[in-house]
Image: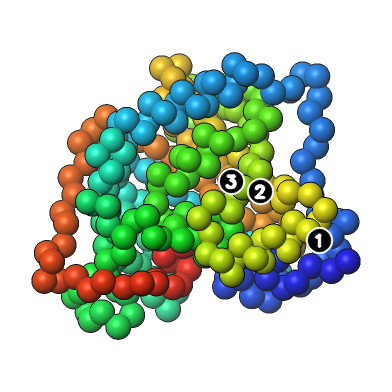
Amino acid sequence: MRRPLVLTAAAALLCAGCSTADAGSRDRPAAASPSSTSSSGARSAVQAAVAALREDSAGFRQKIELKGEGKVYGLTITGGFDFAADRGHLAVDLPGGAIDQIDQVFADGKIYISGVQGTGEDAWGVVPRDKAQAHYLLRAPLNDPEHVLQQIAAMREISRQGEENVEGVRTVRYRGILDHRTVTLRMAPDVRTKTDQARDALGSDLPVFADAWVDGRGRLVQTRMSVNLSGAQVTLTMALSDIGEPVRVTVPQAADTIPVTTVGGILSG
């Protein structure tokens, strides 16, 4: 059985030349050993850390890597978010891309995006936050960091992997998997269809792993989601910092905004 070229929607643009691979050769989640069996305690630790962050604020840096045909493509998303107030800002950078950066502002249930095609040089496109959709595997709708937290909180079969230092912070690393419902959360219909087809070809959920690093104070320090489909790999790592620090958001003036229904391109997710 052969997978279609677009089996991994996350690599559809950056890895457009990725070759096909037999379904049977894809990586699958390994069975849990007695020493790594998931526990309710591990699940509670992750969910508590996510819940605490969603009532707080933080700076963040996401690194997204896509690998295919022996090449590695990467983009970064940096910013700050007041999760309790549902307000934040971020910048997306893709070195060497046709459009190498966009800025985004989240406020009042809306997402403002700079550089949207057809809006003018200094104008901001604006989309209702609840209407945004994901167009790639392991990407959040319009890069919404709250979406990442929602997926991490839904990890299943979680196990404690041991202690690790993350940017000088002592943490406990937890690992789990994401089920199909969580992976396809708020996906655009066409991408959801391709992802459903990939699952059907594989005969099980896609092998999407998730990791969460929690410090001694129960704070979420880093998250990671990854998938490897034999020739196309996607990894999204989000590092958190300055937890509890104020996040200042400058909302574009109404006169500088234009309502848009869709925003395309790899930068926007």
Residue type, numbered disc 2: His
Q: Residues within 10 Å of mark 1 (few under 14, many from 20)?
A: some
Q: CA distance from mark 3 to mark 2?
A: 5 Å
* Residues under numbered marks 3 and 2 in contact, where contact means CB atoms less than 8 Å apart: yes
Residue 185 visible in the picture: yes
The amino acid type found where label 3 is placed reads Thr
Q: Which residue is more in the foreground, 95 or 233?
A: 233
Report how far apart the C-alphas of labels 2 and 1 lie in the structure.
14 Å
**Label 2 SS:** helix
Residue 49, horizontal then vertical, whole percent = 45, 26
Q: Which residue is mark 2?
A: 180
Name above or below for residue 109 compared with residue 37. below
| Most foreground residue, 183 or 225 | 183
The residue indicated by pointer 3 is 182
> Going by the image, does 244 lie left or right of 253?
right
Q: Residue 55: x and y, percent?
A: 32, 30
Task: Residue 88: give x, y in percent of width and height.
Answer: 27, 48
Q: Position of residue 116 (x, y in %)?
A: 32, 75
Disc 2 + disc 1, Cβ < 8 Å: no
Q: Residue at x 27, y 57 (%)?
A: 110
Q: Is residue 50 depicted above or below 117 in this figure?
A: above
Q: Amino acid at mark 1?
A: Ala
Q: Is residue 139 left or right of residue 179?
A: left
Q: Is residue 72 in view? A: no
* Residue at mark 1: 201
